[in-house]
């Protein structure tokens, strides 16, 4: 019963927008805001970790800058992560 209850509780908020907005078009401004929500959420989750990743604050800052640079060039998410890991691995070897 607990599993079924948890399933219903998570199902309802996911299905309500589909039911409520069926056949309706959102204003362009609201569409733009909603398209940027995942990026804002990701930034809010990652930024504090950049500052507290290790004792050395530069470790997080360099990793974030490397990821930003690779992402700015238009690389895939996996390439961004691997690029940041490579830069931080090199930084760990030399410093």
Image: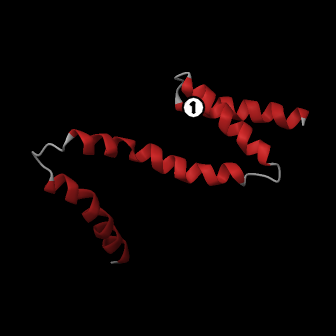
Q: Left or right of 83: which side holds 72?
A: left
Q: Left or right of 25: which side holds 61?
A: right
Position of residue 88 measured from the top left corner of the image (x, y, whole percent): 76, 36
Position of residue 89 measured from the top left corner of the image (x, y, whole percent): 79, 34
Q: Residue at x 51, y 47 (%)?
A: 42
| Residue furthest left in the image | 23
| Quadrant housing residue 77 | top right
Q: Residue at x 55, y 53 (%)?
A: 45
Q: Left or right of 5: which side holds 69?
A: right
Q: Which residue is mark 1?
A: 78
Q: Residues within 10 Å of mark 1 (few under 14, many from 20)?
A: few
Count of numbered badges drawn on the protein: 1
Position of residue 43 measured from the top left corner of the image (x, y, whole percent): 53, 47
Position of residue 72 measured from the top left corner of the image (x, y, whole percent): 55, 26
**In what quadrant of the picture does the N terminus appear?**
bottom left
Q: Left or right of 59: which side holds 42?
A: left
| Quadrant housing residue 15 | bottom left
| Quadrant housing residue 79 | top right
Vertical position of residue 7 compared to residue 68: above or below: below
Vertical position of residue 71 compared to residue 45: above or below: above
- Under circle 1, the secondary element is helix
Vertical position of residue 81 compared to residue 44: above or below: above
Regarding residue 37, the answer to whether it shows in the image is yes
Residue toward you, 45 or 76: 45
**In what quadrant of the picture does the C terminus appear?**
top right
């Amino acid at each position: 019963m607990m599993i079924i209850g948890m399933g219903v509780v998570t199902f309802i908020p996911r299905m309500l927008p589909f039911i409520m907005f069926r056949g309706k078009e959102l204003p362009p401004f609201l569409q733009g805001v909603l398209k940027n929500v995942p990026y804002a959420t990701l930034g809010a989750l990652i930024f504090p970790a950049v500052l507290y990743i290790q004792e050395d604050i530069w470790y997080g800052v360099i990793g974030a800058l490397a990821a930003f640079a690779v992402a700015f060039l238009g690389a895939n998410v996996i390439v961004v992560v691997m690029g940041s890991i490579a830069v931080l691995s090199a930084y760990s070897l030399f410093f």
